[in-house]
Image (cartoon, rainbow, N blue to C red):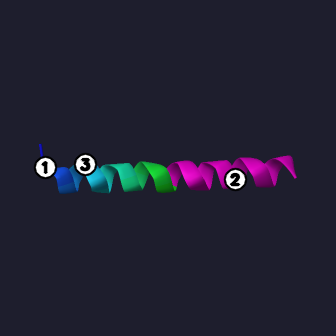
Amino acid sequence: MDVKNVMDGMAKTHIIRYFFIVDLIENIW
């Protein structure tokens, strides 16, 4: 288990989730 790969994967999912939430908020507004 490579820690760096896990961190990169978590960062990518967090970025995707962040943009998804921003998109949702903009659609609501």
Quarter-of-image position of residue 4: bottom left
Q: Please name the residue shown 58% across and 53% down the image.
A: 18
Q: Which residue lies furthest to the top in this view?
A: 1
Residue 22, magenta (yes or no): yes
Give the distance between the C-alpha atoms of the residues marked 1 and 2, in whole angstroms: 32 Å
Tag 1: Cα neighbours inside 10 Å, few (<14), some, or many (≥20)?
few
Q: Which residue lies furthest to the front in this view?
A: 3
The numbered mark, 1 or 2, whose residue comes first in the sequence reads: 1
From the viewer's perspective, is 12 left or right of 18? Answer: left
Magenta residues span 16-29
Q: What element carries label 2?
A: helix
User: Mark 3 or 2, which is nearer the eye?
Assistant: 3
The residue pinned by badge 2 equals: 23
Disc assigned to residue 6: 3
User: Mark 1 or 2, which is nearer the eye?
Assistant: 1
The residue pinned by badge 1 equals: 2
Tag 3: Cα neighbours inside 10 Å, few (<14), some, or many (≥20)?
few
Q: Residue furthest right?
A: 29
Give the distance between the C-alpha atoms of the residues marked 3 and 2, in whole angstroms: 26 Å
Report x, y in % for residue 14.
47, 51
Three-letter code for the amino acid on which mark 1 is drawn: Asp
Q: Please name the residue shown 73% across and 47% down the image.
A: 24
Disc assigned to residue 12: none
Report x, y in % for residue 23.
70, 53
Q: What is the magenta segment's predominant secondary structure?
A: helix
Three-letter code for the amino acid on which mark 2 is drawn: Asp
Q: Do the residues labelled 3 and 1 touch (CB within 8 Å)?
A: yes
Q: What element carries label 1?
A: loop
Tag 2: Cα neighbours inside 10 Å, few (<14), some, or many (≥20)?
few
